[in-house]
Amino acid sequence: MAGVIAFPHLVTGSEMAAIDRQAIEDGRLGATVLMERAGARVVETLQARWGGLEGLRIAVVCGKGNNGGDGFVIARLLAEHGVAVDTYVGVEPTAIEGEAAELLQRLEGEGVQPLPLPAEAGAAIEALRRCDIIVDALLGTGLQGAPRAPQARIIQAINDCTRPVLSVDIPSGVNANNGQVEGVAVQAAVSVTFGLAKIGHLFPPGRAYCGVLERVDIGFPQSAIDACGGMTYLLTAAGIARSLPLRRMDAHKGTCGSVLVIAGAAGMTGAATLASLAALRAGAGRVNLGAPASLHDILEMKLTEAMTRPLPEVRHRRCLSLRALGDILALMPAADALAIGPGLGRYRETTDLVRRLLARSDLPPTVIDADALYAIGDGTGFLRQGQIITPHMGEFSRLTGNSREELAANPVRFAVTFAQRHGVIVVLKGGPSVVASPDGRAFVNPTGNPGMATAGSGDVLTGILAGLLAQGCDALCASLCAVYLHGVAGDRAREELGEWGMLASDLLQQLPAAFVDVITP
């Protein structure tokens, strides 16, 4: 059975500051050493991203804290490389203290004298436009609330100068704790963050300001990272590759697991089809689809590899009836995993069927999605320990009683609280998706894109989840692998089709290659 291996922490700004302090207090690293390393990694990124530094003119805009200290190092190293550097400070020089002041003195010792950016907006924009690239080292991860003057004015000038921006650690104006932007924020082409990614890099709207995120190592000891006590993690390809189930050389369909999908109603055979095919694409040996009897012939045409099981339905409604319960229970002993909900519809008798089925304690590992979540409503007593629920924000709002706005402001906390309270794995779908475990851990998925916001995408995820469960992954491991691979498939589809024309079936086509991408990076 595959298990969950270690993933890197995903931290808040305050947790990262604690890691900084711990590393310094341990005596292993000094603050200036960390800033020197950070500056060097940024210069390396500039070289790699822009094909070398020769002939470039770069503006470095610095603040007064550690972020500004990083900026002073960057400016000095660029000057040592022979780059034309314009260095600006966003505060009075007397406000710069501590290690940042020491690094400013080193910069001035190299003959580089930082200047204030002109106060008049047009003049500031014109000054920045003289450069090819802007390095934003103004505010960093310590920001709370909206940037104040003159920083807000400088951020606006950086955006208005229409030059590519590399942000140091996080774009100035983005809250590292939650990704919120309360005022103005730098729109970066690249963000270089040190040691660990921050929550603000991954969650909207901050995610849109970061551009390409580069996470670089500057030598934080693992002991300092562990001491921060954080329980939020970032999914990575390497971690997912080591978590996927392995196929034996003598594998056959009977050893690769059997999935039972309960799905479909009139007008929604697509949801049932997508979930069933996704389970097979994820490696399940067999899939049985239980659907309303009158839809059987349609599904037989749509599905070649899955087996369809006609179930009793509500006359004239073409959705599952209560009489289907006995038939479903008869199919259950052969199932290694159950997926229920895609396209079931919300007719009252179907809803009652779902509730009666979920009330049983002898279900195989179960994924509850879509209309099955609607059937639960706020009756969370139907949930059983170890089950997986896959709500989007609207469905999660109904389950929790919290508004979408409340959930969006802190999705990690709400997902973890729900998982702990009910003993289930929560796969909270969104950009990004969050997987929360009853043990208090949360995992954030960096893959995927807005093109996946199309009908049926969630049904594909449900099928992948069920397919991995059937192959022996535990509920948490299956959830982590499924959301990551689902996103990789979406990213591959975007590369081929763009974000506007993607269909959920495109994810199915890309899923085998997504597995290959992860297993053989």
Image (cartoon, rainbow, N blue to C red):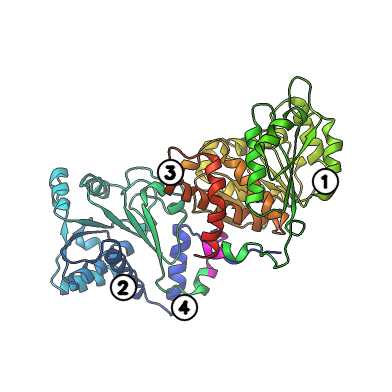
Query: Residue at 19% of width from left, 72% of height from top?
Result: 81
- The answer to whether the residue labelled 1 contacts the one labelled 2, judged by CB atoms less than 8 Å apart, is no
Q: Which amino acid type corresponds to the residue marked 1 in the rendered image?
A: Met
Stretch of the chain drawn in magenta: 226-239
Crowding around mark 1 (Cα neighbors within 10 Å: few <14, some 14 to 19, many 20+) is some
Q: Which mark is residue 26?
A: 4
Instruction: Locate residue 78 relative to residue 44 in the image: left or right.
Output: left
Mark 4 or mark 3, which has the lower sequence index? 4
Question: Considering the image in quadrants, where does the N terminus appear?
Answer: bottom right
Query: Residue at 52% of width from left, 62% of height from top?
Result: 237
Q: CA distance from mark 1 to mark 2?
A: 61 Å
Mark 3 or mark 1, which has the lower sequence index? 1
Q: CA distance from mark 2 to mark 3?
A: 42 Å
Query: Horizontal and vertical percent for residue 56?
Result: 17, 62
- Residue designated by label 2: 36
Q: CA distance from mark 4 to mark 1?
A: 56 Å
Q: CA distance from mark 2 to mark 4?
A: 18 Å
- Viewer-closest of 86 and 475: 475
| Residue mark closest to the camera, 2 vs 4 | 2
Mark 1 or mark 2, which has the lower sequence index? 2
- Residue designated by label 1: 332
Instruction: Locate residue 232 relative to residue 491 in the image: left or right.
Output: right
- The answer to whether the residue labelled 2 contacts the one labelled 4, judged by CB atoms less than 8 Å apart, is no
Mark 4 or mark 1, which has the lower sequence index? 4
- Secondary element under disc 2, as helix, strand or loop, is helix
Crowding around mark 2 (Cα neighbors within 10 Å: few <14, some 14 to 19, many 20+) is many
